[in-house]
Image (cartoon, rainbow, N blue to C red):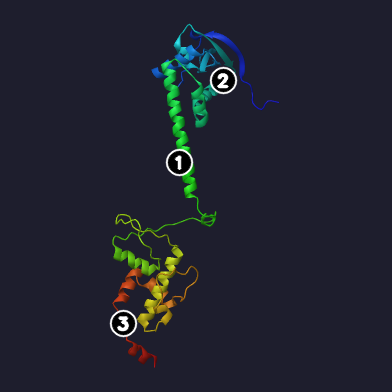
Amino acid sequence: MNQFRDRILEVKKIKSAELLDNAGNWRVHPNAQRETMTGVLREIGKADVLLTYYSQRAGGKLVLFDGHLRKALDPDEVWTVAITDLDDAEADKMLLVLDPLAAMAEMNGARVLELTDRVNTDDLMVRELLRKMELEAQRAGEEDDDEEKSKKEKTGPAAMELMPFEHYDYVLLIFKNELDWLAAVDTLGLERRADLRKTNKIGLCRVVSGKQVIERIQQLEFRVAQNANGSPIGQEVANENHSAEPQTRGHAHEPNAETVSERHRDGGRTRSGRLLESASLPRRSRKSRAASAV
């Protein structure tokens, strides 16, 4: 059993002058297309049919919905015409989608190149059409190679692939001088690396987990609060190696409730402002710390 209806009623030989152009035909046929079509017809002949239907809008006459260019070549030419039982609405739809539907096909560049190697033509316009198709096929092949190469280069470890519930948000920090960059390296606990490119136009880049940055800032705030309150800081904290990787889970010290609440009460003062203020605090001598401990 056929899945689709056969809408062709009959096939007849009809002269061009007996066929009506479709008033809704949106195709414009330039001279180059007309000359190329003529060249193909001369070399090969008629190998396709014109598509028509009996139009109620045209008083029951045969109206084209495909084949306007061929019909226009010569009013006395006789064509093989497929007559369908479409109505005006269906013919309008076919008129609209036939060419775009064909254009949706993608090119297999390798096969096009194989065909152009086998096909010969004496018509200049047909030859030009084949030359353009060959160039397009070559470009398509080069783009496919570049895309495949790009996919291979961009393929990373499976562990880096995003899960369905994940996404990336970004904050971009730009440092215009080396001092600020080195301060960021120390503050965020980044690993120091040598610049092998020997250029001052392209800077070094690091991708750091936002969670790690937040944890690092919270630790620094806690230390600032401890200094301001006069609490001694452990030797292992004071001598921390900033070049080591920052902790990924948990904190060495959690910020106390007072520090967190102050952050919300201070009217939006930035963390960096708090750190800068702490830098102006006088350092307590070992003697004063020892005295306070006693």
How far is disc 1 from disc 3 in space, using C-alphas?
60 Å
Residue 261 in view in this figure: no
Q: What amino acid is at disc 3?
A: Arg
> Which disc, if any, is residue 87?
2
How far is disc 3 from disc 2 in space, using C-alphas?
93 Å
Quadrant occupied by the C terminus: bottom left
Marks 3 and 2: which is nearer the front?
Answer: 3
Please indicate whether residue 30 sits to the left or right of residue 199 in the image: right
Please give the residue where the numbered disc 1 appears in the rendered image.
Answer: 146
Among the two numbered marks 1 and 3 on one chain, the one whose residue lies closer to the N terminus:
1
Marks 1 and 2: which is nearer the front?
Answer: 1
Marks 1 and 3: which is nearer the front?
Answer: 1
Residue placed at 40% from the left, 19% from the top? Answer: 32
* Residue 20: x %, y % from top left: 49, 13
Residue placed at 53% from the left, 57% from the top? Answer: 159
Local packing at callout 3 (Cα closer than 10 Å; few below 14, some 14-19, many 20+) is few
Callout 1 touching callout 3 (CB < 8 Å): no
Front residue of this view, candidates 7 and 56: 7
Reply above or below: 192 against 86. Answer: below
Q: What amino acid is at disc 2?
A: Asp
Please give the residue where the numbered disc 3 appears in the rendered image.
Answer: 283
User: Which quadrant would residue 203 be assigned to in this image?
Assistant: bottom left
Local packing at callout 2 (Cα closer than 10 Å; few below 14, some 14-19, many 20+) is few
Quadrant occupied by the N terminus: top right
